[in-house]
Structures are given as C-alpha cells and as structure tokens.
Image (spheres, helix red, strand yellow):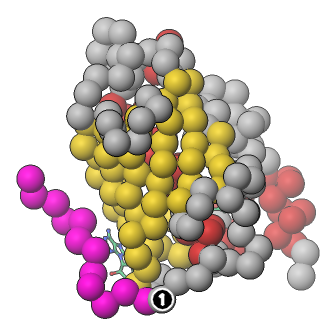
Amino acid sequence: MKSSFVVPTDLDPVQRHPKAAKAGERMRMHNPMCFGCGEESPNGLRLEMFAGEEFTVDAAMRVQTQFEGGPGVIHGGVLSTAFDDVMGMVPLLVGPSAVTVHLEVDYIKPIPVETTLQFRASLLGRQRRKIYTEGIAHYGDPTQPVAVAHGIFVTINAREHFADHLENSQLSDEYKRRLSRP
Ligand SMILES: CCCCCCCCCCCCCC(=O)SCCNC(=O)CCNC(=O)[C@H](O)C(C)(C)COP(=O)(O)OP(=O)(O)OC[C@H]1O[C@@H](n2cnc3c(N)ncnc32)[C@H](O)[C@@H]1OP(=O)(O)O
C-alpha cells in the first residue's frame, strides 16, 4: 500500500495541555453546528467525544439509516467524516485548534447501518505545527478494527483562520460576538 502519510522521526516533545479535558471527561464541542459532533447540527453525525488516557480520544457514533452508502452499510464518506472529526480532537489535548491537511482511510470490513461504532484516535507525534494522528473504528474490541485512518492536522489561530467566513456560519452572530471580545 502506498501512502503519503509518514510520521517524521524528528518529533517534538509533547505534554498534555493543562486546560485539556481529563481522561473520561467529555470534550468540548468546537462548534455546535459542526456536522461531525455539533449538538445543534440538524442532520449531523452526533459524535460524542471523550478524552482518553495519554493522548487519545474516544468517541461513539450510531450509524443511522440515512448514513447508508452500499445497501445496508455505511457510506465511506460518512466514515471518513467521522474519522476527521474524532482525530481532529486530538490536537486539543496538546495545544490549540488544528485543521485537517491530510486524511486517509483504510476500509477493512463493511459496517452495517443501525450499529454503534466506537472510535479511538491517538496522537502519533507532533512536529512544529503538524500533528500526526491515527484513528481506529471498531464494534467494541479495539484489536478488531473495521477501519483505520491517518490524518495530519496543522495548528491554527482560530480567530484569524475563520475571520473571513464567520458570516456564513449558522451561528454567525454568536461567533461575531465571541470574537469581538479583546
Ligand atoms: C471561531 C473558533 C471556533 C473553534 C474552531 C475550532 C477548529 C477545529 C475544527 C476541526 C474540524 C474538523 C477538521 C476539519 O474538517 S478542518 C476542514 C478542512 N481543512 C481545511 O480547511 C484546511 C485548509 N488548509 C489551510 O487552511 C492551510 O493549508 C493551513 C492554514 C492549514 C496551513 O497553511 P499555513 O500557510 O498556515 O501553513 P503552511 O502551508 O506553511 O503549512 C504548515 C505546515 O503544514 C505542512 N502541510 C501543509 N499541508 C500539508 C499536507 N497536505 N500534508 C502534509 N503536510 C502539510 C507544511 O509543509 C508545513 O510544515 P512545516 O514543514 O512548516 O512544519
């Protein structure tokens, strides 16, 4: 298998951020309208994220019938969206928000609709602003993954990164108010 995902050997040291969620605590939504984890997203995936031990994030997602791709099984794009969002929480364990620059998924087994999928995302390393992550999806036994993903996230200054797009958010007023604070 050929992949452009290569974790560098000269990684930076990492520490859990003092304000990061503790193991077992629910992780804060980065945006209530997020299609992945937002509680106010009307048709979203409704992922529930929890900080794990060390540098891990655990999540669960009910595979709703409208997530169907092939007959009776999850759409591959829905699964990659879920991985993106779960792995996208790993940077928050070590520092500021980060956005995806690279995402790849290996699909191992078909995943039936109306099951509950468990995810575990782990930090593989950080180099400067780049955060390397791995995610696995399973039905309860993490040693039997049904899909595995790898992602690279780059830390951002959220205030600057989203400044030109707040107008388009379904919560634009709330964000403008929040970001106008000094
Ligand atoms: C209002 C606030 C609300 C809260 C917000 C929460 C946000 C969380 C949302 C989470 C939602 C879920 C997640 C989502 O859905 S995130 C949505 C999808 N992602 C995006 O929209 C990101 C689009 N990309 C960008 O905006 C820019 O590329 C950014 C800003 C990320 C970097 O551009 P910038 O000009 O700043 O930096 P740089 O170009 O010098 O790159 C920096 C480093 O990165 C390396 N690199 C770059 N690309 C790649 C690549 N493909 N493979 C490997 N490496 C790559 C590059 O070599 C360099 O490395 P180094 O050698 O210098 O170390």
In this picture, which residue range is highlighted in magenta?
1-12
Magenta span has 26?
Answer: no
Q: What residue does disc 1 label?
A: 13
Q: Is residue 116 visible from the viewing direction of this image?
A: yes
Q: In the picture shown, does residue 81 fall above or below 53?
A: above
* Element carrying mark 1: loop
Q: In the picture shown, does residue 110 fall above or below 157?
A: above
Viewer-side residue, 144 vs 163: 144
Query: For the stretch drawn in magenta, what is the main secondary structure?
Result: loop
In the displayed orientation, state which residue is furthest to the left.
1
Residue 92: give x, y in percent of width and height: 62, 67
Magenta span has 10?
Answer: yes
Dividing the image into four equal quarters, which quarter contains ligand 1? bottom left
Which image quarter: residue 142?
top left
Q: In the picture shown, does residue 179 fall above or below 25?
A: below
Q: In this view, does 179 lie to the left or right of 36?
A: right
Q: In which quarter of the image is the C terminus?
A: bottom right
Crowding around mark 1 (Cα neighbors within 10 Å: few <14, some 14 to 19, many 20+) is few
Residue 58: give x, y in percent of width and height: 56, 48
- Which residue sits at x=44%, y=73%? 131
Residue 166: give x, y in percent of width and height: 71, 58
- Which residue sits at x=73%, y=63%? 21
Q: Is residue 89 visible from the viewing direction of this image?
A: no
- Which residue sits at x=89%, y=63%? 177
Type of residue at label 1?
A: Pro
Figure label count: 1
Which image quarter: residue 19?
bottom right
